[in-house]
Amino acid sequence: DQQVKQNSPSLSVQEGRISILNCDYTNSMFDYFLWYKKYPAEGPTFLISISSIKDKNEDGRFTVFLNKSAKHLSLHIVPSQPGDSAVYFCAASADNQGGKLIFGQGTELSVKP
Amino acid sequence: DTGVSQDPRHKITKRGQNVTFRCDPISEHNRLYWYRQTLGQGPEFLTYFQNEAQLEKSRLLSDRFSAERPKGSFSTLEIQRTEQGDSAMYLCASSPTKGGDTQYFGPGTRLTVL
């Protein structure tokens, strides 16, 4: 039962262009959503989050959009930089479920110079 | 600014041996989580603590696994009689208060069972 899905295992983008990473979820009890970036042999690094009461959150080059009716969220990176190349995980939690994070399978982003 | 730390970073052991990992959370955080990540997958929840109380354990956590957080600060995860299927990255995360707050992860412990 995969409650959080990232259907694109990989994405390749040219430097300076927009990267759009997508994530779908099934559990309507999720009320907090996060994006993490991960390099090999390191722990996930927090990027940006959004509460279910919002539909957009921005932090510098990173914007997360939440569409609750579609149970879909996306991460936009503009402009993309080679240093953004990593695996990106979306995660979701429900306050009434202890806040444990349910992760997607990850999308490997490659930003080419 | 001290983040979440984990020790050791790498552990190689033979099947059947016991191993113990340590996690030191961010000092003011009272929630501590353990996750496991295998190749090509996202991290999977194992267990979490609110202060010293272990509030939930995943069905992934078999009887060979035990976790403690005796004084509500650092935590240990022990695996007894390791199996090759236990080979994974074990991640620890902490968050300040209740669910919904951002979890910050440590660097992980890479376990290889031969």
Image (tube, coloured by chain):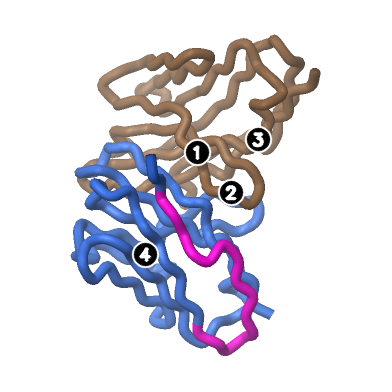
- The magenta segment: B4-18
The three-letter code of the residue at mark 1 reads Thr
Circle number at residue B74 = none
Determine which residue is flagged by label 3. Answer: A86
Answer left or right for B49 relative to A5: left
Q: Are marks 4 and 1 in contact (CB under 8 Å)?
A: no
User: In terms of image quadrants, where is residue B111?
Assistant: bottom right
Q: Which mark is residue A45?
A: 1
Question: Is there CB contact under 8 Å for labels 3 and 2?
Answer: no
Chain that the image shows in brown: A
Q: CA distance from mark 4 to mark 2?
A: 23 Å
Location of residue B1 (image quadrant): top left
Which residue is pictured at 63% across the width and 11% down the height? A79
| Circles 2, 1 touching at the beta carbon (< 8 Å) | yes
Q: CA distance from mark 3 to mark 4?
A: 28 Å
Determine which residue is flagged by label 2. Answer: A42
Chain assignment, label 4:
B
The residue lying at 35 percent from left, 25 percent from top is A50
